[in-house]
Image (tube, rainbow, N blue to C red):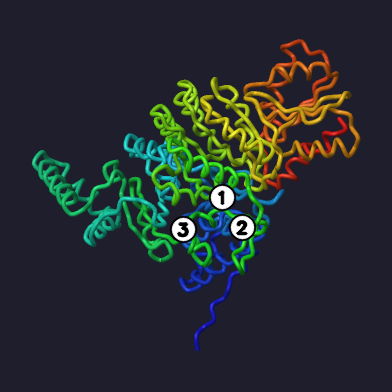
Amino acid sequence: MKKEVKHVDLLSIKDPKFLKDLSYKELDVLSGDIASFLVDITSKNGGHLSSNLGVVDATIALCRVFDFSKDKIIFDVGHQCYTYKLLTGRDIRTIRLANGISGFQKKEESPYDHYEAGHSSTSVSAALGMAVARDLKHEHYQVISFIGDSSITNGLSLEAINNTQGLNNHKYIIVLNDNDMSISKAVGGFSHVLRNISVSDFYRRSKHLFTRMMSHTRFTRAIYRSVCRFKNWTKKVMMKTTMLDSLGFSMVGPIDGHDIKAMEKAFIQARKNDKSTLIVLKTIKGKGYKYAEEDKEGKWHGVPSFNKETGEFYNASNISWSEYFSSLIAKRMNNDASTVTITPGTGYGSGITSLFKQFPDRMFDVGIAEEHALVFASGLSTSGLHPVICIYSTFLQRAYDELSHDLARMNLDATILVDRAGLVGLDGETHQGLYDEAYLSSIPNVTITMPSNTHEASLLFNESFLHHGPFVIRFPRETILKSTDTYSLEYGKWRKVLDGKDKVIISLGPIIHELKNALLDNKIDASLYNALYIKPLDEEALKDVMSFKKVIIYDPYSTVKGLTEIVSNYLINHGYKGEVISKAVPDVFVKQGTIKEQRNRYHLLVKDIINL
C-alpha cells in the first residue's frame, strides 16, 4: 500500500526552511498545490499568472539551496515572485489589494525582499552592484538575478553583463528562465557535458590544485600555459562559444526548470563556484493551468479577474481604449502604405496582436527595448514613413532621452499612443501612468493630448498625421466611452463643454463627461473646459478663464506637476488675481488599490470637485 503524501498548509508557512525536510515526491505535490492556489488567487485579484506558474518549481529549488534571509535574490521585473512571497511567509490572498501585499518585491514588506522593480532588465545591474558592495564590505552571501529571456536581451541587461568582465572578481549568479524565447544554445551532447563539469566540485578543486602545483618554476609555468591553450582550443572546437562565455561566465544548462532535483544540483554548483555563473532553465510558461499553457499571444501574462473554470475574463465584452485605437491603426494602415506600427513587447496589452497578421511587413515588436523603439521610430520617420508607437505610460519614461534627442529635436513626425495613462490601480507604484504629462511637457516640439471619447480619439489620431512632429495621445486603462458626436477640433484648441458664470473648471479625459453630468444634476452654474490639448496650451481659452474669480483645474490622470501646474503657472505669469484650486494626484508614488480607491484616497472623485 502506497504511503499517502501529506499536503502542506500553504497559509501556515512562515519561512522556507521547512522545504529541506520534504521529499522530492512531497515537493512535487507542494508545487501542484501552489500552482492551483495561484490560479485561485489570481482569478479573484487579477495579476501576473503565466509567468508565476512557470517558476513555481524553480522558486522551490532556489529556496532549498539558498538562505534568502542572508542571500539576496532579485526577480527581474518582480512579477515572478508570487511563489517566493508564499514561501517566505506572506498571505498572498491579499496580493494587489489595497492594504494587501504587493504583486512585486517590496523591501518594506519583508526582510526577504532585497530589491524593488516593476520594469524589466534591472536585475543584472543591481545584482552586480550588490556583489561589489558585499565584497568591499567583506561580507559573505550569494547574489542571484532571476531573469526571463526577453529581459536579458534588453540593452540594460547587456550593459551590466558587459561590465561584469571588468569586475569579474565579484561573483554573482544569473538564473535565466527560458520559456522557448530566443537564446543561443550550445550544440551537441558533449558540449553539455563540458559546460556541466566546468563548475563541478571535482573540476574546481582540481583546477585550483593544478594551478598551485604549476606556479613554482619557470618550466612548470610554461607547461601550465600550454595546457591552458590546449584546453581553450578543445573548448573552442567542441563547443559553441556564446557572448557570455567570452565575458567570463561559467555556464550551466539548459536544465529542466520543472525538475527540482536537477535544479538543486545546478544551484549548488553555482553557489560553490568562485566566478559568476549563468544557469539556463527551460520552463513552461503557465504550467499547470490549461488556458495559460496554451496561450501564445500573452493573454495570460497579466490578467484581470476571471472564471478559472472556463478561462473567461470578467467584463471582457467592454471595448478598451487600446482596442479602439487598434481599429484606428488598422484603418490607417489599410489606406496609407507609409504608416508603420511599433510596440516594445506589449502587443497584446495594446490590442494590436491581430494587426501582425494583417500587416506583417509593417508591424514591429522590438521586444522589451523602449529606448530602441523610439530611435527605431526616428529612423523610420526621417526616411519618410510615419511610425505609430504603442507604449504604456510607465514604460515610455524609460525612453525619455530618445524621445527628446532623436524624435523631438529633429521634429520628426510620429504618433505616440500612451496607454495606461493616469492611475492604473492594482499594480501599484511601479506601473502608474501619472508622470508623462510633466516630463513630456518639458520637451520642445512635442504635442500632448488626451481625448475624452471615441469621437475625439479619432479626430486626434487623424490630426497626428498632419506633420506636427511627435504627437502624443494619452488614454487611460478603462472602458472607452463611445460617442456619436460630429463636432470638429482645431489643433491646439480646447473645447468649452458648459458655459456658466460662477466659476470655471478645466479638466480633461473621460472624467469630463461624469463631471459635466454632475454639474448639471446639481444645478451648479460653472463653465467647463475640456483641455484635450495639454501642449500647446490654448491661450485664447485661457483669456476667457482669467475673467472668472475662481479657477479649478481638475486632472485625475496626472500628478500636480502636469496640467494643473502648467495652467497655474500660465495664470500667475499673466497676472491672474483670482483663486486657483489645483486638484490632481500629489507628487508621490501611488500605492496599489482600485482606481476608485486611489482617487478617493486623494479626494479626486467628481463629488469632491463639484462643490469647491
Residue identified by numbered label 1: 112
Residue 582 in the image: state x and y as whole percent: 76, 26
The answer to whether 245 appears left or right of 227 in the picture is: right
Distance from label 1 to label 3 (Cα)? Answer: 33 Å
Q: Are marks 1 and 3 in contact (CB under 8 Å)?
A: no
| The furthest residue to the left | 219
State the residue at coordinates (64%, 57%): 92
State the residue at coordinates (67%, 47%): 479
Q: Is residue 133 visible?
A: no
Question: What's the mark number on residue 296?
Answer: 3
Residue 566 in the image: state x and y as whole percent: 68, 22
Question: Which sits earlier in the primary sequence, circle 3 or circle 2?
Answer: 2
Instruction: Say which amino acid is labelled 1.
Output: Tyr
Question: What's the mark number on residue 89?
Answer: 2
The answer to whether 342 appears left or right of 508 in the picture is: left
Distance from label 2 to label 1 (Cα)? Answer: 9 Å
Instruction: Say which amino acid is labelled 2.
Output: Gly
State the residue at coordinates (83%, 36%): 608
Q: Are marks 2 and 1 in contact (CB under 8 Å)?
A: yes
| Secondary element type, mark 2 | loop
